[in-house]
Amino acid sequence: MKKQLALMAALAAFSGATCAQDSYIGLGLPGLYTLGYAYSTSPSLGFRAEYAGGLSVNKDGYQDGVNVTGTLKANRFGAFADWFPMGGGFRLVGGLTVNDIKADFNGIGSGNATINGKLVPMTGETFNVQVKFPSTTPYLGIGYGHQNSDVKGFGFYADLGVMVGTFTADTTTSLVGKSGITQSDVDAQTQKIRDSLGSLTVLPSASIGLLYRY
């Protein structure tokens, strides 16, 4: 009986709490557009889930004897906790993102290139590189909006933060066994690419848009 009374009291307290919820849409990066839902449980705490995606960029170029076709795609799902330290719209944000963010560079040779210090004729040969952000990363940031409020209707929000993770790189090529190129040479060239990406330990994230509170 005591447990039942305690549960009823807890439910009554929760049902009497002032909660606010809103849906929102925005523009930003790394996803081109953002769709989300926010739920604040008190003047100091709220939770959000959002999807950011739609970014797809293609670009052609030429580098080191290779004609390169580059493709960048970015999609992300995020779950966040918002802390409003001053009770207003300003908030500190922490959370987790599940990412599909990668760049593919597909190259077909038309000249000479250097692979692990060896000059190689690249005509007709392929050298492809995929650069990828981790599939799961922590998120830290600041923002404005989504605060607990009795005011219904339209408003705005803004977010600025970083996803913490290190890019990786993988390569495929038709060069192994040709012009004295071994798999060890390709691995060494791949490691140079990875080393150049090693300093990129965060990916900026920004979004701004409209919300509707109900």
Image (cartoon, rainbow, N blue to C red):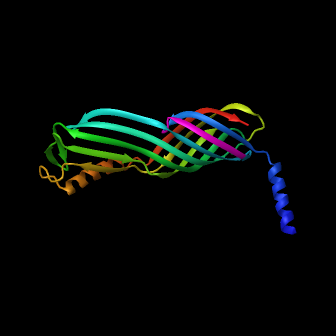
Image quadrant of residue 141? top right
Query: Residue at position x 56%, y 37% from top?
Result: 34
Residue interval drawn in magenta:
30-40
Residue furthest out toward the left:
179
Quarter of the figure that contains the C terminus: top right
In the displayed structure, 42 sits above or below 3; it is: above
Name the spot of residue 22 as percent of width and height, x first: 68, 39
Q: Is residue 10 magenta?
A: no
Q: Is residue 43 visible?
A: yes
Quarter of the figure that contains the N terminus: bottom right
Name the spot of residue 124 as percent of width and height, x first: 17, 40
200 displayed left or right of 17? left
| Of 169 and 87, the residue lying toward us | 169
In the displayed structure, 143 sits above or below 182; it is: above
Number of marks drawn = 0
Name the spot of residue 198 as percent of width and height, x first: 37, 50
Q: Is residue 145 visible?
A: no
Residue furthest out toward the bottom:
1
Name the spot of residue 119 as percent of width and height, x first: 14, 45
- The secondary structure making up most of the magenta span is strand
133 displayed left or right of 95? left
| Of 1 and 48, the residue lying toward us | 1
Query: Residue at position x 60%, y 32% from top?
Result: 209
